[in-house]
Amino acid sequence: VLLNVLTCGLFVTEKLRGRYAALSIAAVVIAVGIPLWWKTTETYRAWLPYSHINELGSLQLQLSMEVEVVFSRGTLTPEQQKKVPLTQTREQQHHVDENTGLKYRYEMKYRTATIMEEDALRQPTAEEADFSLYKLSESPCGSVVVYVIPETSVLLPENIKVYVGQRRTALLRGQVGQGGELKAVLSALDPEIEQVVRTMSFSHEDIMAALSDRIRMGRLSKESLADSMRSFKSSPGYEITFSLLNPDPQSHNLHWDIEGAIHTYIQPLLDKLAPVANHSVDSQILYYAVLGVNPRFDNSVSAFTLSADSLAHVINPVEARLGSNAASSNPVLNFLLFVPDAHHSPLFIQDHSKRVVDSNAFHSPRWGGIMVYNVNDRYGQEAEFPVHIDIDMAHVMGVFLAQLRLMLGVQSAHPPPGFLLQSPGSAGLTDWELDRLQWSRTVENVATASTSITSLAQLLDQIGNIVINDNIAQQVYNAVTSLQAAVAELEAGNLAFALQYSREAILASERAFFDPSLLHLLYFPDDQKFAIYIPLFLPMCVPILLSLLKMAGELRQRRKEQRAKRD
Amino acid sequence: NLCTAALLAAVLVCGLTCASTAAAEEAITEEYESISNANEHVQAQDDYARSQKRREITEHDDDQNEPPPSSSSSSSSSSSSSSSPPSKDYFKEELVIRPLSSGDIYASFQFQTRWDTDFFAPGKKVSHYRLFPKSLGQLMSKFSVREMHVSFTQGYWRTMQWGQPFLPAPPGAELWVWFQDSVADVDGAWKELTNVLSGIFCASLNFIDSTNTVEPTASFKPLGVGNVTHQRFLRYAVLPREIVCTENLTPWKKLLPCGSKAGLAVLMKSEKLFHSSFLSLAVHIRPVCQDWGCKGTAWELRQTVNVVFDLHTTGQGKREWSFFKMFSRTLTEACPLATSSKVYIDVTDNPQGELFELNPAAPSLTQAVVLGDRRTYAVYDLMASGTFGLLRSLNVLLRWKTPVDMLRPLLHGERYVAGYGLQTGEIHTLIYNNHPYRAFPVLLLDIVPWYLRLYIHTLTVTSKSRENKPSYIHYQPSKDRLRPHLLEMLIQLPPNSVTEVTVQFERALLKWTEYTPDPNHGFYVGSSVISALVPSVVAMDTSYTLEHPLFSTFFPCKEESSYFVRVYTEPLLVNLPTPDFSMPYNVICLTCTVVAVGYGSLYNLLTRTFQVEEPSPGVVKRLANMIRYLRGVPLL
């Protein structure tokens, strides 16, 4: 009996020890093993400002601009003049879609003209007046100054109500002899000023087109969509390449003074556009380069013709010869001057209604332009081949310059009737056109950068085991801060700063999005990882689990016994 | 002027010392008279560079004194568009055909585009291209490249059977670049440049990284004019594994002004070119003198194709070839943009027409000294109207009458790996000097990847079974996964001898991600490069006043008694110890099982409860007890 009791006691202590051992092993596995495994197999993920990025997901843009309305002598009565100056703020709110909102804020400043301005307005023509006003004071980037001149003024030709100058000023013919309240005068002027502002600065359509990255297509009007699809996407730089295609060097020895032509015609425009993007220009001559389609001989015009339908097939074979730009990854704008060979001259481009296009040129959206230049009338039948031909660059560059403006996104303004727009002059671009471009580029940059940052954040969030390095986090952070700064500057009405910040934002966001370290397939799917670990995990976990289950069963058994005993 | 002269002297001294101090010092102690030849070689190159530079400097001085005429003319031309700017670029094309004694045909195309412009003139960007390809021009400007040589070669040039090529190239891809001395981050520029080039030529040049890039000290001197000689600005890399195919030829042809539409390039039909024993495409860009007086530099782009056709086997044993048989095309016109377009056919062995006949007969003969040999060439000038005859096409036909012997090349090299097993091995390089009585020095350049660990103490050089001490050794040990071994030696080759260079190595174990997809194929080790000034049988032509064919003017030649030759040996294919690649998974599984078994027993020991149990009586005992019970005897 004693032995029995002893063995029983031994058995009980032994059982207790076994239970403690199982428990402590389980505890070690849970407390040390799992964290260790977790730590050693985890990927490095730098912290990203997710909350800020989420804020960017719903973009509320506010565009502020300053409109100065200056009354010259004779447009206001003396008592009205006493109440001027004053300022008014007008706001327009647009709800674009659930994530995007737009708000335009016009700060109208009314004042009377100074003596100097009165002097300037006394110039004989509107153009000279515009120039003298510009010399008096330079209005900041993005603002508009409207001078209200008396109805009887001879500055403007008849039937012209509004004259828009080369800079940021407009002359508006006011109604004469209006008595009564100043407010009534102002409200009578309002619709006209709004028209001026819409012509010279951003309009809702432009901004919506710039936002096309963020919002669905259906919401855009067809025309602004076409405009926005024609021009290149906003980019920090563009490579402009002029190529002379000479398919027949045996007959034509072509010379073009491209260096001088670029210097005279293209460079002033690019200098003007410098705040929007960097441009680099080069040129090349390609021999034996042919178009992709065979032109058909048309007896009615006794010339070869390219129909508008076949133009789409022209570019591809030429493009293979153009060569990509080795030195940068900016988008390339191609301008091709095609001189048809002697056997296919003259060559004309026909539009959809079978009429010969005057410029003999066409452009391809977001790619560039092609111009056909016929030289067959430069030499007779008996000419000695190859014929030396100098190309008239003024004619060629006129066409290319118009195409370049389209490609770079300088939208053609559609002035309402009664408007007279001053032609841009030697620079090829007026100040207010540049402002318009800057407004839409800024909005476009902000929209693009915010979408790429949010989609990057979403992607990184979804795929949990991509490594996020510190430099990517830094780029994302830079992009987010620049975006916030750009939005704030837009709100404050500082267009130049806003554009600069938005360019920084787009650069940083693209760099983060296309960083090669994100593409690295350095991660494994979870199921494969576990397949490898199973030979270790399964034999280790099963005994632990079984003994834990057993212990739980025993515990339950004992409780039942205790309850039975108590009963 | 004094200032610049002093500066020039300083730079030159520096360049000289860097390039050849060791060589010069060693050479004095050596007794061989011809070692000084090597010095002269280096000196000659430096002299050449010096003279070029002096000319350049005086040129620049002139420029400063008076307004440059080109700028004034360009400004005037911009104002009046009728006056055309002076044409400042030239294009020449040339095809040399040499019948080889083995029965093969060696055809060498050379296309030269020369542009009299300065890519790196301060304040002026070159961006308007005519004949020079824009993509290469942009590359030169962006990366400040001074000289670039890239070649893609399929097959190995058999020097012993074929003699020397006009332009040597190792199998695979070779790229060497001299950067301008204004480049601060040469490695960064090199990395980007290789990536861009791989895009331009559709080649795997992007696989060039620090593990296969070296900076040779003496073997690769600039071939153009200029004053940078420090190897800091030189990068050299070989990819022996590169396969060359049509996708490399197409972009190469695109760089020609006429493409493959006119001129000699019409003959380059890819299915014929690649059906050959040897094919080498190359692009060389270097600054050259604008004129004989060397006033100002021009940029030369030289595109070459060297191809060896095995017409003996494909021609059913008939020794006869024609353009149409080789290229399945004939020539119909010269490239209209070319200033010179010529076909040369080597007829040296056939002075009286007794060995073979040419059809149509060559309009003229010319002589050129190339690779130490005076050769006679039949010339067909494609610019002349009479060349094409009545059929408006040129199809040169050559028919042999009797077989011929070939002049043995004076210098040639071989290389192989010796040894057994996968642990160690030995690289043997054999250099042959076949000159009957002249000894001459050669520069040997060896680039060995880091995974072959060279035992440099086992390096031996023997000629005629006697030790041959190299007079100059430059050795840069490898760093694992960072850079390869670089070994450069100046070795004196005794006359009519074989010099053997051996070095032992150990094969390293790679990480499992570093193996190629087909590791059992082996790993390539690029060719060794042997550069030498070989004594010439005939006097070399060193005057620059004559118009030479392109194929004889690639390597600048300064001495009449010798000529420069570069010979590439075979690339090596070395097996490395290769693991079974399912090993990681097997190891994981096995380890896990072992751990699990050990852990399971330990766990059982720790958690199971043990009881003393009455042992049950055995069968015999139980049987005995049963009998005892039956008998009534007390149990056991």
Image: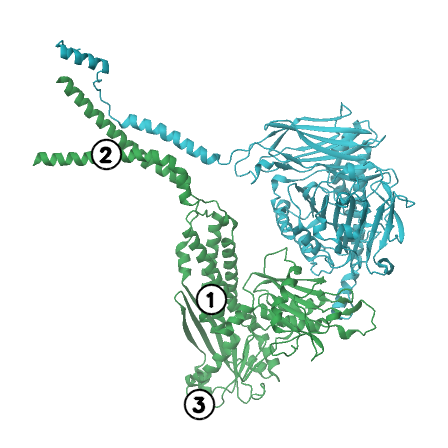
Chain colours: A green, B cyan
Res. A490 mark = 1
For the residue carrying disc 1, how many other residues have a C-alpha within 10 Å: few (<14), some (14-19), or many (20+)? many
> Picture coordinates of residue B590 (x, y %)?
42, 31
In this rendering, the answer to whether B87 lies above or below A120 is above
Circle 3 sits in a helix, a strand or a loop, which is it? loop
Label 3 or label 2, whichever comes before in sequence order: 3
Q: Is residue A226 above or below residue A76?
A: above
Estimate the spatial distance between the alpha carbons at disc 3 and disc 2, rounded to whole Å. Answer: 102 Å
Could you tell me residue A208's position as x and y percent? 47, 70
- Separation (CA) of disc 1 from disc 3: 38 Å
In this rendering, position of residue A57 left or right of residue B76: left
Residue at left offset 42%, top offset 89%: A180
Label placed on residue A550? 2
The residue identified by callout 3 is: A179
Whichever of callouts 1 and 3 sits on the residue coming sooner in the sequence is 3
Q: Amino acid at mark 3?
A: Gly
Give the image location of residue A467, x and y in percent: 46, 46
* Quadrant of res A393: bottom right
